[in-house]
Image (cartoon, helix red, strand yellow):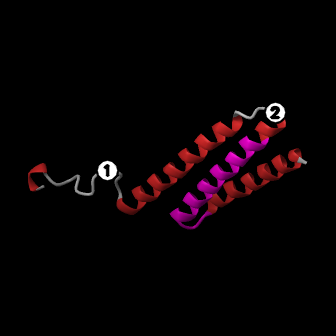
Amino acid sequence: MFIAAALALIVSMALVLIRAFIGPTIYDHILAVNVFGTKALLLIAVMGFLTGRPEFLDIALVYALINFIGTIAIMKFFKFSHLGHPYANDSLGDL
């Protein structure tokens, strides 16, 4: 049963990759990469269950946090064209 779940996840990851390559907007690309990361997280958890290694769940949780923070950072970069201080081009004397 879990092998079928793993195969279904792999197929859906392939479909998401197709969406990532043909998405019309940048937000479609970012959403597809985020969904791919979520599917990879689920695949790590299922593989951990299949191999009897519960520590894979810890790895999956860390991967979920990295996926979330990375998606937020990429969205901020494409919206504001930088990740740092919004007034990075101004001199420090103006503060």
Label ID, residue 52: 2
Percent of width and height locating residue 13:
72, 52
Q: Amino acid at mark 1?
A: Gly
Q: Residue at x 44, y 52 (%)?
A: 73
User: Is disc 2 in contact with disc 1, using a CB cutoff of under 8 Å?
Assistant: no
Which stretch appears magenta? Answer: 23-46
Q: Position of residue 40 (x, y in %)?
A: 69, 46
Q: Residue 39's spot in the image, x, y percent?
A: 70, 51
Q: Residue furthest bottom?
A: 24
Find numbered disc 1 in the image and state the secondary structure of the residue it sits on: loop
Residue 84 place in picture, x, y as percent: 31, 50
Residue 29 is a magenta residue: yes
**Residue 57 is drawn in which quadrant?**
top right
Residue at horizontal 64%, vertical 37%?
A: 59
Crowding at label 1, few (<14), some or many (≥20) Cα neighbours within 10 Å?
Answer: few
Amino acid, disc 2: Gly
> On residue 84, which mark appears?
1
Of label 2 and label 1, which has the lower sequence position? 2
The C terminus - image quarter: bottom left
Vertical relation: 37 (above or below) 26: above
